[in-house]
Each structure stands twice: as C-alpha cells, then as structure tokens.
Amino acid sequence: MEWFTADGYWLSRLVFQRALAAVYLVAFLAAALQFRALIGERGMLPVPDFLRRTDWRSAPGLFRLHYSDRFFALVSWAGCAIAVALLAGADSYLPLWAAMVLWALPWALYLSIVQVGQTWYGFGWESLLLETGFLAVFLGNAHTAPPVLVLWLLRWVLFRVEFGAGLIKIRGDECWRRLTCLYFHHETQPMPGPLSWFFHRLPKPVHRAEVAANHVTQLLVPVLLFTPQPVASAAAGLMIVTQLWLIFSGNFAWLNWLTITLALSAVDWSLFTAPPAQSAPPLWYEIVVLAVTALVAFLSYRPARNLVSRRQVMNRSFDPLHLVNTYGAFGSISRVRLEVVVEGTDEEVLHDGTVWREYGFRGKPGDPRRMPRQFAPYHLRLDWLMWFAALSPAYARPWFGPFVERLLENDRDTLRLLRHNPFSDAPPAHVRAGVYRYRYTSWRELRATGRWWHRTYVRDFMRPVSLGPAWISPTRRS
C-alpha cells in the first residue's frame, strides 16, 4: 500500500521521537526523586493504601502485581535509562518489532506510575504524555518510512490540546472574551517563572493583543493542521511560537514542551533534506497500525463529543489506559493570588511573642525577596498542589495533614521536597499555616526594596499543631 507511508516525514519522526524521549526522561526523573514523600510506603498518600481501595479495572498497572518503595524506584530509574537509550537513538539500531517494544516500555512503566499517583498525578500533561507515548510505539524506526495514519493521529492529539484549551477559555471566564485575562494571569498562575514579573508589567494593550493572538492560535490555527503542506507546517510553526511564549512566561511542567514535540511531527522537512533509503513496511506492521487507528477512532467519540458540549470538561481520561483524552487549561482566571505559608517554632509553650520560622518551597512564592525560578519542564508536584490548597482547603484535605505531620518529624524525604528547612538540628514543636495575599511589586518598589512580591496576611489556614495524643488534622480551619 503506497499510501501507507510518508517518506518525506522521516526527519519529522526523528525529531519527534528524540524530543519525546527527553520528556520521558524528565517525567521519570521527577517520579524517582519525589515519590517517597508523596506516595511511598510512608508517604502522604501511600500507594499500598490506594491499591487496597481500588481494583485492576479502574487502575491497571505493574504495581498491582507488587509494590514496594524499592520496586517503584526500580521502575522509575529503569524508565530514565530507557529514555536515555531512546534519546541516543537506540531504536534505530533495532529491528522494527524490537524498536516498537522499546518504545512500549516507557509507556507501560509511566502508565503504572500514573495509575497509583493519585492527586499528585492528576494533571493533564500526565495523560498527554501517555497518549502521545502510546502513538509513538507505532511510528516505526529508521528502517521504514513513517506511517501516514499515525502522523494524522498525532495531529489529532495536537488539535484536541489546542482547540480544547481555546474552547474552555471562550466558554469559561468572561475575561477571555473581553481580552483582559492577562491583566491577572502572569501574577496569579500556579508557578511564576523568572520573567513572569516582567510579563505582568507589559502595557495592557499588549496583554489584550496576547489574548487575541491566543484565541487565533487555539481556535483557528489547529484546523489548518489538516490542510495540505506547507500550510500545515506553518500552522505547527505558529503553535510552537505560542508555546515558547508560554515557556518564557511561566512554569507548566512539560505541557508546553510536549505540545511543541507534537507540533514538530506535523512539520514537513522534505524541502530541506532528502529522505534516506527505507524498506517497505511488513504486512504485520500495516495490520497493527490499521487496528490501532481504528481503536483510536472508536475511543475518540467521547473526547470529540466533549469538545462540542456546552458542559465541556478539562483534562479528563475516558479509558483506564489514557489512550484518548480531553485537555484544556485556565477556563477561569484568579484575580487575586493567595499562598499558603507554612511556619514552625521550637518553643514548647506558645505565647504572643512566639518566634515562627518559615519553610521555603522550591518553586512556589514564599520569601518576597526571592525571584521566581525556572523549573519547567521539571514538575514540582508539592508546590503545584500548594497553589490549589490556597484556592480551597478541600484540595489539600487528603494530604496536608500527613505533610504537616512529617514536618513535625523532620522526615528526610519530605524535607527534600523543600528548598529550606529552618529546623535542621531538631524537629519543630509546633507547625502552623496562614493564607497570604501576594501581589507583584511595582518597578519603584522593586528598586527600593529588592522585593518581587508584596504580601499581606488574610486568614489562618491551619492553627498551630504538634505531635502527640491531641493531634488534630490541620486541614480543619480555625
């Protein structure tokens, strides 16, 4: 079947595969370095407890067969090793079937991690990595030309990512329709980056132009992905530029990088380089690709229906393997930035003059003098959920109590998630948390004080607690 392959997209596939391998590496590395405190056997939301509450059908994966922290670490570091091998091009030196197995391994390993990740892995880019990684298994290697059907399926993923995000904005917060959301977004986004302060200080007409350009890129340009070249390449290029703008203005884990990876697969590089000699795909490979295409088309019904629904939902998986999902972000924009500030004291008896010392987080705003850092594509899961906790204590109810308990114990794994522990010699006697309003300082304030943020106390988030028989869940607000 001559129509089955697209010889000119060999370089598009190569760039896509290497970029996807890099994203896999970051994802597995984050899992390996953070899991013990988050979901380990002594973590805030232990995997063994989750496995007892759920069954195979709802969350299939390797950890249904066995779980231990050592086994989870083995899975995570094995994923890192496989990602490095793929990044180095190991699949190009294998037969087609072996290359497909090699690409299937990180997908299966990361699926197993996401299935037990619970709240910590409830982000849209987890499903996006799994859906993209599943399709990458069937994209072939250097021995055969890329299959047209899989290339179209990758564009279908990219279309849903961008178009879904555009629709949820238009249907959601009115500031998107008024072109005013970026008056607030750079200041109130989950984790600002080092340039976010400067983006926030751009003139309001520029912010309005940003929103208008975003609507064009997310609502009109995605349709062009399904047009002939070079229009489809130009559409993919516009998406890449937009994603780079988002990378510079904030920290969104690997969402933007993975979207760029998908867009690269739609670029036709044949104008710049000739394809190498490639053999015809074997019959069994053609049958497998046709079957996968039929499966994805069948599973796409519910995500497609969600796109046109007035009750559109964001970041939802419709099957337990995350094969075809729905995406979207920032259907509503916070106008005010609230942060939970966690403090401790070594004084056994509390009084009006008690000295409280603040814990420092790696990514989320804390010390007003500390310039926001760049962490994406690395994902700081605790910092992200602290942002949700500030929006509503209900987000934190399952894990905030265990988090505080581990601070009171000076738990080593938990403290590794933080930038600064003010109680390095001995655990604190009490821990408390308060909600503060943060706003960016002005140019004048920044020059005069060196502060990037101005913060004011709003309310208690958690009254002072200590370990002992009188322990009360700190998610109860006084």
Image: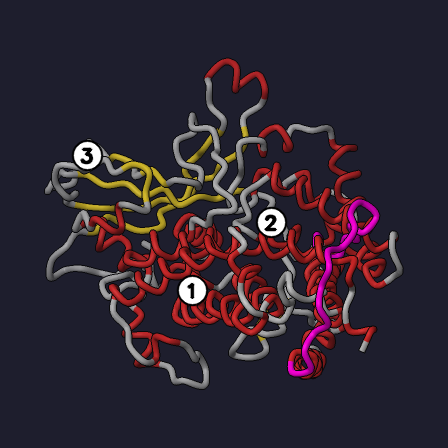
Residue at image coords 29%, 36%:
420
Residue at image coords 64%, 43%:
246
Q: Badges 1 and 3: C-beta atoms under 8 Å apart?
A: no
Q: According to the image, label 1 marks what residue?
A: 119
Mark toward the viewer: 1 or 3: 1
* Magenta highlight on residue 307: no
Residue at image coords 44%, 43%:
339
- The amino acid type, in three-letter code, at marker 1 is Thr
Q: Upstream in the sequence, badge 1 or badge 3?
A: 1
Q: According to the image, label 2 marks what residue?
A: 257
Where's residue 457, x and y in %? 41, 37
Q: Give the range drawn in magenta.
A: 264-284
Q: According to the image, label 3 marks what residue?
A: 354
Q: Upstream in the sequence, badge 3 or badge 2?
A: 2
- Give the vertical position of 130 relative to 192 (above or below): below
- How far apart, in angstroms, are the residues tagged by discs 2 and 1? 22 Å
Please indicate whether residue 264 sits to the left or right of residue 416 in the image: right
Query: Looking at the rendering, in which quadrant would you find the C terminus?
Result: bottom left
- The amino acid type, in three-letter code, at marker 2 is Trp
Where's residue 362, x and y in %? 39, 40
